[in-house]
Amino acid sequence: MDTSKPPILIIYTGGTIGMIENPETGALENFDMEQFRNLVPELKRFTFQIDSITFHPPIDSSDMEPKYWIKIARIIHENYWKYGGFVVLHGTDTMAYTASALSFMLENLGKPVIITGSQLPIGQLRTDGKENLLTSIEIAADHDEEGRPMVPEVCIFFENRLMRGNRTTKINSEGFNAFRSFNLPPLATAGIHIKYATHLIRRPAPGEAFHPHYLLDTSVIILTLFPGIRREFVETILHIEGLKAVILKTYGSGNAPQKPWLIEKLRELDERGVILVNITQCSEGTVEMRRYGTGLQLLQAGVVNGYDCTMEGMVTKLMFLLGHDYPKARIVELMNTSIAGEVTVAP
Ligand code: ASP
């Protein structure tokens, strides 16, 4: 055993990577970590120690909930000093939400947390799971000459790209290259060599300790605009008791139809203390509400800029900030700040 490299902990939550076809129904069902290790004998070829913790039962990531994010964060917290890095095996469907949530919950993270999965189960001949798993382990254990982890961030590794977790989105339900980070280049690419974009990689603030957070408030909705959107439907949604934040998915650079009732409703919500955030329906680019009158009207109604944040990043950022029960002014201030590298804002 090579003791120059720290041990790695695999946290197996479920997903296609660990599924097998039920011969009677044809449906994919989960199997356990022991079966998993038998299907990946390559794991024995790593010269450092690899331990694992399994969710019982493993879950399809469509069943992901904030309570499971808390569970993953706790496992990382409890094992933080024992391991040099963590690999989280997860279904692809909600992987970008989990990666985003963990990026906020694991403040001042000093170790790699690499989330991966696959499109084909690891037991199938053409699986993409083996390569994703083996490269993720390698990245989680990789250190520079001074012994510092190469990527002390929450990332998603898929196919050949390592991406900042809170910048990724699942874009393909079929292909092996299922994730993209449209507004930030990959943190590393894996070919013959693993090439790190070191200038993009975040490092913990010097002298600050790792600080996990477990408070999340889910009083958030997403309202996607479309031509013909009906007033009575929007008003019903925006009247819901307990609503604390609305993510508006707008057109282009952050534009909305010029409907007086919509702007009036938004202004009223803003005055009631509801946080309104603008993100774009475009995959790439950012929100600039001053660019057109159709964006400016939102700014004037109290809508906050979500910049180039992904939907997954914004949902989880709001859950995280609302969970802290900050006053609205503080939340607005933090919405205009990159707290875990999730948005590109001018310093
Ligand atoms: N439904 C599966 C999941 O997200 C899909 C996958 O893992 O690719 O758990």
Image (cartoon, rainbow, N blue to C red):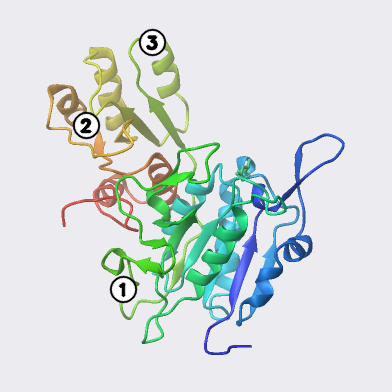
Q: CA distance from mark 2 to mark 3?
A: 22 Å
Which residue corresponds to mark 3? 230
Q: Is residue 201 above or below residue 146?
A: above
> How far separated are the C-alphas under marks 1 and 3?
47 Å
Q: Amino acid at mark 2?
A: Ser
Q: Residue at x 83, y 34 (%)?
A: 25
Residue 253: assigned label: 2
Tell me which amino acid carries mark 3.
Answer: Arg
Q: Is residue 272 left or right of residue 41?
A: left
Residue 129 in percent (x, y) is at: 61, 55
**Residue at image point 49% right, 50% down:** 216
Return the disc, 1 or 2, that comes first in the chain's sequence: 1
First in sequence: mark 1 vs mark 3: 1
Q: Give the crowd class for mark 2: few <14, some 14-19, many >=20 residues within 10 Å.
A: many
Taking the spot 57% from the left edge, 90% from the top edge, the residue there is 3
**What element does badge 3 sit on?**
loop
Query: Judging from the image, what secondary structure is the residue with disc 2 in?
Result: loop
The residue pinned by badge 1 equals: 205
How far is the residue under mark 1 from the one under mark 2? Answer: 33 Å
Residue 296 at least partly seen: yes
